[in-house]
């Protein structure tokens, strides 16, 4: 168990494999309180150049123990359908890099949508002005080919969709339909421009994380294409 009194700077390896910092001890403690750092999070002690699990840091264990005493109902409160809380967003890994204040600001620029099963959220060919975060429920992307709906994939809570068309201002490339009652956060391009004008650092952070997600998606598709090509290649 290490005491942090002599350590002045830290870096944190987040769940999205990005390194944040350097930060001081007060900030590190605040991140624990906001649940951005948990016991399994890797923390770099800069003077020693040593990575350790947050659970091995004595000064943080008091904070972790304090969080353990909070009843589960307080960690994930029963939500009014008309509101979205920081606690709800904290359930999704993608929001760990954001502070509570940043999440509250982000939500304030979004619109909450509630959709019954079978509702069309995005229609192929429509001009795009929004991206969506699925809070609860399930949606399916699909194409209508030869009079039949062809599924392209399902999305579960915590996933974003529609961001490519919103950023590129191009027509939607597929339908997205709810498969069960769902709640979604909608961010329009106009509201994102407002956010960028009033909170440029937060907007830049969101764009960076979106670009990482898109790059990862493209890399995965390239790997899948290479596998398909390799499996269809016939040696002669």
Image (cartoon, helix red, strand yellow):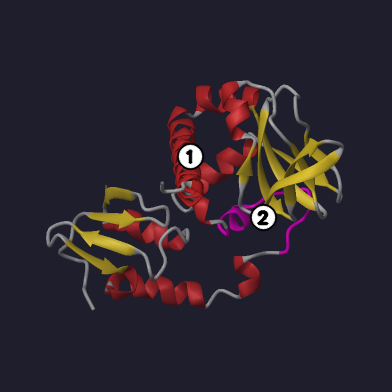
Q: Which mark is residue 26?
A: none
| Residue situated in front as seen by the camera: 157 or 21 | 157
SS state under label 1: helix
Q: For the N terminus, give its image quadrant.
A: bottom left
User: Where does the image place residue 77, in percent across and percent down from the top left?
Assistant: 68, 64
- Residue 91 drawn above or below residue 101: below
SS state under label 2: loop
Q: Which mark is residue 218?
A: 1
| Residue situated in front as seen by the camera: 13 or 195 | 13
User: Where does the image place residue 10, in percent across and percent down from the top left?
Assistant: 24, 56
Q: Which mark is residue 156?
A: 2
- Residue 204 drawn above or below residue 153: above
- How far apart are the alpha carbons under marks 1 and 2? 20 Å
- Residue at 67% x, 55% y is 156
- Residue at 74% x, 54% y is 138
The magenta-colored residue range is 78-91
User: Where does the image place residue 227, in percent across and percent down from the top left?
Assistant: 47, 50
């Amino acid at each position: 168990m290490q005491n942090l009194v002599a350590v002045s700077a830290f870096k944190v390896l987040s769940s999205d494999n990005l390194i944040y910092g350097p930060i001081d001890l007060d900030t590190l403690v605040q991140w624990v309180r906001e649940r951005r750092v948990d016991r399994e999070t890797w923390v770099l002690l800069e003077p020693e150049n040593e990575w350790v699990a947050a659970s091995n840091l004595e000064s943080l264990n008091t904070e972790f123990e304090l969080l353990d005493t909070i009843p589960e109902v307080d960690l994930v409160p029963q939500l009014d359908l008309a509101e979205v809380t920081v606690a709800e967003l904290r359930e999704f890994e993608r929001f760990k890099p954001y502070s509570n204040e940043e999440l509250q600001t982000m939500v304030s620029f979004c619109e909450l949508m509630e959709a019954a099963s079978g509702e069309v959220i995005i229609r192929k060919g429509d001009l795009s002005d929004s991206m969506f975060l699925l809070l609860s429920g399930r949606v399916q992307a699909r194409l209508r080919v030869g009079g039949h709906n062809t599924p392209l994939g399902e999305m579960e809570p915590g996933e974003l969709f529609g961001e490519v068309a919103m950023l590129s201002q191009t027509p939607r490339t597929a339908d997205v339909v709810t498969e069960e009652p769902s709640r979604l956060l909608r961010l329009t391009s106009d509201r994102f421009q407002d956010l960028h004008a009033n909170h440029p650092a937060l907007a830049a952070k969101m764009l960076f994380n979106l670009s990482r997600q898109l790059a990862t998606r493209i890399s995965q598709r390239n790997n899948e294409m290479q596998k398909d090509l390799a499996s269809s290649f016939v040696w002669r």
